Amino acid sequence: MLQVAKNIYQYRELISELAWKNIIVRYKQSYLGIVWAVLKPLMLMLIFTLVRSFVGIETGDIPYPVLTFAALIPWVFFQESTSEGVISVTSNAPLIKKIYFPREVFPLTAMATKLVELVISLAILAIMMAYYHLLPSIYALWIPAIIAYAMIVALTISFFGAALNVYYRDIAQALPVGLSLLMYGSPVMYPLALVHKKLIVEQAAGEWSNTLYTIYTLNPLAGIIDSFQRVLFKNLPPDFNALYPGAILIVAILPFSYLFFKRAENWFADVI
């Protein structure tokens, strides 16, 4: 992992240039330009708000639209960073065949591109919070750490997926389906507090309740989204009990994901 940090620093200018090129190409000749970056979470927020009007989801004193939009910010960042990261190697085949540099630059570049869009979404969230008269507390200083954790989770999947996608292009086709299913297994449409209430407080699944809650929190996005909402709206620090199961899983998987990527990159130019 120290090698990853070293490569980020050594090739930081290349990553910046490639990220800027991606942004220019993506929104070139587009009337709305980078506004498209926030349309997805805004539209999902509106859909979830409509669904909630029929289903009924408790959110306490926090308005549902702003709570959901806050959940969608880390989710969309993770989803799109992962999706772009997995196809980042195959989509840069000409560069791979011409010159050598550490191939992890490509997943990192995909993530850097999404960071720009993340900043825009955060600006929209700030406007919404002002509209609803919601003021962040000192705990909002946790936001960079939460985003950094989301980046690590996305990279863990991106390294493994990008290497595998070079050999099996079905990976890129299957990933959106898997991520869509994962969204419903994450507290995006509903708060984690609702899952905690049903499984831990009410023991809705009987003797399996505690086990099911632990399995649920093995999804790192559960702790990330909940923490994002807690530090912004509830004046509370992150719930580390919800964070640590997923964090342990990622710490265990990330080294193997990176080693798999580094071993596979020796044949990228031949296969791609």
Image (cartoon, rainbow, N blue to C red):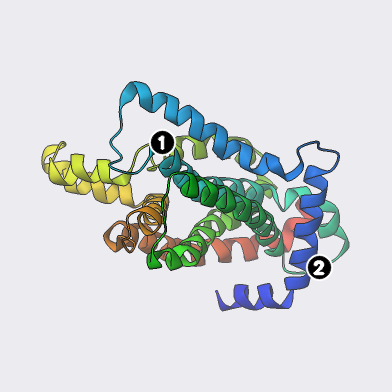
Quadrant for residue 79, please give it: top right
Distance from the alpha carbon under mark 2 to that under mark 1:
40 Å
Quadrant the N terminus occupies: bottom right
Badge 2 amino acid:
Tyr
Q: Is residue 161 visible?
A: no
Q: Which residue is mark 1?
A: 184
Q: Which mark is residue 83?
A: none
Q: Which residue is mark 2?
A: 100
User: Dot 1: within a 10 Å radius of its alpha carbon, few (fewer than 14), some, or many (20 or more) residues?
Assistant: few
Rendered residue at 79%/55% (across/down): 270
Quadrant for residue 53, please give it: top left
Q: Secondary structure at mark 2?
A: loop
Rendered residue at 16%/37% (across/down): 205
Outermost residue on the top side: it is 54
Q: Nearer the viewer, residue 48 or 168?
A: 48
In this view, the mark in front (2 or 1): 1
Question: Sequence-wise, which precedes: disc 2 or disc 1?
Answer: 2
Q: Position of residue 74 (x, y in %)?
A: 50, 51
